[in-house]
Amino acid sequence: MRRIYLDNNATTPLLPEVFEAMRPYFLEKFGNASSIHQQGQQARSAVEHAREQVAALVNSRAAEIVFTSGGTEGDNLCLLGLIKPGDHVITSTVEHHAVLNVCKRLEHMGCDVSFVPVDRQGVVDPDAVKATLRPTTKLISVMMANNETGVLQPVEEIGRIAAEADVYFHTDAVQAAGKVEIDVRKIGCDLLTISGHKLHGPQGSGAVYVRKGTLLQSMIVGGRHERGRRAGTENLAGLVGLGKAAEMARDWLGNGGAREMAALRDRFEQAILGSIEMTRVTSGSAARTPNTSNIMFECIEGEAFVIAMDLKGIAVSTGAACSSGAIEPSHVLTAMGLTPEEARSSIRFSLGKQNTAEEVEYALGRVPEVVAKLRELSPLWKRHAQVLK
């Protein structure tokens, strides 16, 4: 069966060029970057080249890049490595759980956390962030792009607010890196998190931008790796792949790749809205990453839709998350004002650089079939049909 992958916000396939860049570091160039012999120095050179490639993607100094295992570790490092009991943290209600669950831990540690709401488009109001500041505020953490809706937050405005208040600003850019331009100087952030597998790099690789002068307490204690900020022998092949993926993402953005992807996404959304009634795009009027569509199909169950599409060879995901063995409505969508039923009937389609216009057209041919079939089985849809009669 033909397989089409439209769940790139979950993870992206490794690009062939990235794999080829990594290949020698599995077999021939396998040294420990801390060793002083030839193999070690060869490895050290590769790690530092990757650091320069990642720095170029976010417009930072190479020395300001700290390598991690991915976005979750990066977010944990930025919050737990900076905040102490008695500090106040400001975040939003739509953050990834890598931030939200750290904030819960901070509360247990004796910190105060304020959760700023979003509007119906999923956007944080910078004035609400400013109004939440206290004398004890030490950090503002607001994501750059949302993983479920693709909404881009006004991080430059929030960065200015943080600078004026003399508090640290962290932004989780895991879903933004490689999809939109990132300039840490313009954003004005002190900390920024990215993950390799969200931009066609390898899983298990990531990086944090740490502005010069920002003191983070290491969470992993050991050697002096990463200038004492993250102990442990470097994931050599993984970091080489991350660097190559960052380099390719920068070239893709510079050559208009984001515009082309946004046009493909818009074509997909317009076709869905034009062919299926009682359907709407969540956050459709907000600034978004070019690859993400969150579409609500009334009177269907999202989990059933995902399974039915998978049986047709197409991978997508729901706007709901599995929590403690029970399907709960997405905290992101409910924070935006969607009802639990609307959240459970929302589907995320996310494009990657490997997707083609022909694949999108193929998917467009399957979605109406699946929605129609599921609605035939839906008591809510049957009641709706009776009302129309």
Image (cartoon, rainbow, N blue to C red):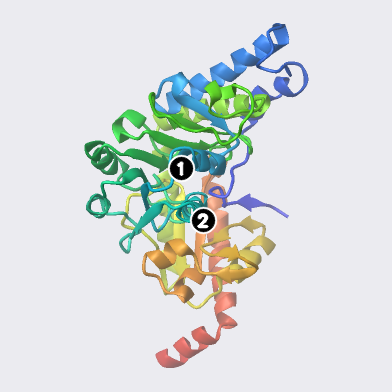
User: Which residue occupies 44% across, 28% down?
Assistant: 57
Q: For the residue labelled by badge 1, is the local secondary structure a helix, a strand or a loop?
A: helix
Looking at the image, residue 304 lies above or below residue 2:
below
Q: Position of residue 242 (x, y in %)?
A: 57, 29
Q: Describe residue 254's horizontal placement relative to residue 208 as left or right.
A: left
- Please tell me which residue lies in front, 302 or 59: 59
Q: Amino acid at mark 1?
A: Leu
* Vertical placement of residue 155 versus 238, above or below: below
Residue 367, quarter of picture = bottom right
Q: Which residue is mark 1?
A: 79
Which numbered disc, 2 or 1, marks the residue closer to the eye?
Answer: 1
The residue under the point 57% across, 52% down is 7
Residue that badge 2 annotates: 349
The answer for how far apart the CA atoms under marks 2 and 1 are is 30 Å
Does residue 373 appear left or right of residue 25 in this picture?
Answer: left
Q: Which image quarter holds the N terminus?
A: bottom right
Discs 2, 1 touching: Cβ within 8 Å = no
Q: Mark 2 belongs to which amino acid?
A: Phe
- Badge 2 marks a residue whose secondary structure is strand
**x then y, percent, for residue 150:** 42, 51
Of residue 175 and residue 33, the one placed in the foreground of this image is 33
The label number, if any, that marks residue 220 in the structure image: none
Eyeballing the image, is 228 above or below 80? Answer: above
In depth, the one of 15 and 63 nearer the eye is 63
**Position of residue 227 measured from the top left corner of the image (x, y, whole percent):** 53, 21
Q: Earlier in the sequence, mark 2 or mark 1?
A: 1
Is residue 88 visible in the rendered image? The answer is yes
